[in-house]
Image: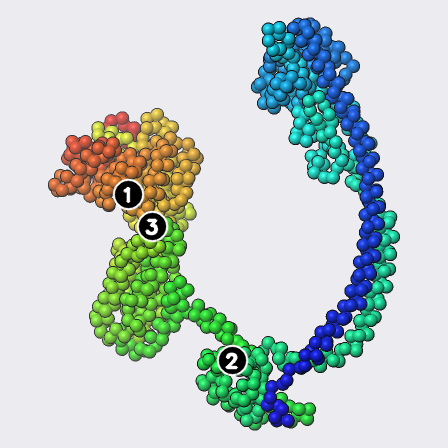
Amino acid sequence: MTTAAKSCPPKPSSDRVASPSAWRLADFAPFALAALITAAALAVLVRIDGLEQSHWRDVERGEVVRDLDTVRSRLELSLTAPLLRTLGVAAYISARGDISKSEFAAVARVVLEGNRNIRDMVVSRGTVIAMVYPEPGNEAAIGIDFRNLPLQWPSVARSISSRQPGMNGPVKLVQGGTALIVRHPIYLPDQAGPDRFFGIVGIALDIPGIFSEAGLTRSDRTLDIAIRGSDGLGSGGDVIFGDPHLFATDAVQMDVLLPNGTLRLAGRPKEGWTRNGSFRMVGAVLLLFVAGVSFGTAIHITMRERARRTLIESEERFRATFEQVAVGVIHTAFDGSLIRCNRRFADMVGYSPEELSRMHYEDVTHPEDSSSARDIHRRLVEGGLDNVICEKRYQRRNGSFVWARARTSVLRDATGAPLHVVTVAEDITERKAQEAEIRHLAFFDILTGLPNRRLFLDRLTETRSSDSDGGTFGALIFVDLDNFKTLNDTQGHRIGDMLLTEVGERLRRSVRAGDTVARLGGDEFVVMLDTLGPDRAVATGHARDVADDILARLAEPYRLEGHVHYSSASIGIALFQGAESSNDDLLKQADVAMYHAKSAGRNTLRFFDPAMQDALSARAELEADLRRAVEQREFCLYYQPQVDAAGRVIGAEGLIRWQHPRRGLVPPGEFIPVAELSDLILPIGRQVVDMACAELAAWQKRPETRNLVLSINVSARQLRQNDFVGEIRDVLARSGIDPAGLKMELTESVLLQDLDDCADKMALLRGIGMTLSLDDFGTGYSSLAYLKRLPLSQIKIDRSFVNDVLVDPNDATIARAIIALGKSLGLSVIAEGVEQREQWRFLQAEGCDQAQGYLFGRPMPARDFLALATTGTGVLAAD
């Protein structure tokens, strides 16, 4: 018994395996014969039914052809008679050479008598209608040139060129109504050469009358009829009666023959083509009878044969189960030797079943799992366990391993005596790999491969816990990329992702092997430095060195998809020692320091200081107030006068103010930076445009202020919007102002992001009629190249040059050069920040066109500005 048990079971003989399969095929033989008999009966019945239906259809179509031919004959008669009448009139005129109005009336009266379907008759001289009968009610037709009727002229032209009669319509008549028109060209014989074209005789036929004579409008009509062939074009013309879809069906069709044209008729019974169902009822009963007898016999034969075979097949299935299950099955003796295993387990470990039958279970157990496997086997043998489920690794022949979920139990005989150990092993290697991948995704960033926020916080907690006595310093370096959103918006997310990946690599190279670099999300990264020593100054210096190195590395050029890109970062640093602060507090501190770095001009670093938190709280409060201000529209415009060279007010610059409910009037310097960082600058900018256009509309309604120009500032964020120009168009349309009165001032920094896009949008604004001014000229990246490319009207000298123009030769030279440059490019020049008469005299002497500043007036409410602007004289503020 033991010897037999230790060998793998022999395969069943081929005869015994094949026999059940042959019997199963034999099961279908009676049913196949029954199906064949039923199919033969069905084929005979279908053939007979087909002949019956064909005969029925021929009879029915013959009736439709007869009725439709009657309609065709009536239509031909109704349409041919008028054509012959036109031929007679044409012959009359051709024979006489001309016809007078009275003669035409007499002839037409004869033609129309007794034919109620003729509405009127016309005769043209050339292509212009000269006479119509009856004339009352049809006067509008006289004088019409057929060449000016695009729907009729092609048909008229064909009749003239072919000298044949023609039909046109249905057409709408200029004198009202719709009709079919039959025409015949009139040619006069000419002894000296070819016949000479005289004109056309035409008759307008009443469509309902024609169709009524043909029997198409009878209520007892049994056919659905449609007619196509407008202008006599037959199947090529439009449908003039009935349902157009009838021509796409199996309806009977025939032609209505006309002189020089045809109409196409289609007809079928109103209830559709019918079928003779009497034979089908008889055939269905016969077919059911034949099928019932045939299949009843087949079922009786098959059930008797299957009852005889069931026991044999059941035994074969039981024997095959061991080899066919989708899991590995292992029978193990109490001494640990493998008795037998199925093919699935053999494939899992890379051995043959014969090889496994000569091995011990530890030979295929992973070394790290051998101890636990021995313990489980011992307890099963000793009776301490009945069964156990565990996950373990099996060692493969090639040295790799496979994960399995193993269910092990003791197999007993009928008396309960133990026989051997049985293990069912399910391969879970793929599941384990997926679990490992899930764990990786849970703790690592997919894009950069860096630890994510979760793993970073775990490591931060572990680092702080390991130094619970606070003996050494660590540092968090919070890295936020500058202007990353702009890169994403302009270059696309693919380039943005490539940049983030490269940033991650550069950060890795900037730190020690034991330090942690993580991506928190978006363009935010954090570096954790630990074991910086017990001295704060030393730790601070080391953290600064690492942060400086990071700034330098991140500022180096990036080559992404063949193009060079540049980026920079703002860094906030927070030192920590032991567990004195929570993880969230440390991250907030580093984040606060980073925002201070951004506020300091970006591409720099800041260490956290407690005072920063107070500033951040104040900024958060201001931002919340600012959001409410946008919703409540708490902003207003103040207007600073702009004067020409003679000191006359020619316009103003609209400067935003915030009417805070508690703090009063807030100047823009306090809230615009916050608006820029929080994306509120866009709705604020839209409100500025709305207020400026509304005020300008009021100015343009008054004669004394209609020529004033109002300037407003446009931020870089506004100009980068895809729909910016569309928004401006909408506001201009709503306000109804003359766009020439609105001037937009753009700073040089606006032009640095995408000069081509800026130039395109500025050109569109100029096309609307607005004027454009370059603000703060000379303070940014002044370039003749972009001055030549941009559709500017004006440049503004920055106040920094005007302030010291009288005392600093360099500022005087710069101001003088800007004025000269503007003149050479055909641009007007305005100076801002003019506060002294001497400054204004200097600028006037150099040819400056316009100015604004405290010398002429401070920013003021609209009513004060209008009072100042309408004085009619030059204006200077008191010294």
Q: Which tag, 3 or 2, sits closer to the chain's start?
A: 2
Dot 3 corresponds to which residue? 676
Residue closer to the observer: 291 or 143 = 291
- Which residue, given by chain and number where applicable, does mark 1 sit on? 747
Locate residue 699, reporting x and y percent: 35, 31
Front residue of 92/502: it is 92
Few, some or many residues within 10 Å of mark 1 (<14, 14–19, 20+): many
Q: Gap in Å between the C-alphas at discs 3 and 2? A: 66 Å
Q: Tell me where residue 698 sits by quadrant.
A: top left
Q: Position of residue 399 (x, y in %)?
A: 45, 81
Residue sitting at x 27%, y 43%: 748
Relative height, residue 817 to residue 140 (above, below): below
Residue closest to the eye, 447 or 265: 265
Q: Nearer the viewer, mark 3 or mark 1?
A: 1
- The image shows residue 581, relative to residue 167, as above or below, that is below
- The quarter of the rendered structure image containing the C terminus is top left
Task: Give the number of marks.
Answer: 3
The residues tagged by marks 2 and 1 sit, at their Cα atoms, a distance apart of 74 Å
Badge 2 density bin: few <14, some 14–19, many ≥20, Cα 10 Å: some
What label sits on residue 288 in the rendered view? none
Camera-near label (3 vs 2) is 2
Residue 532 location (% of width, % of height): 25, 73
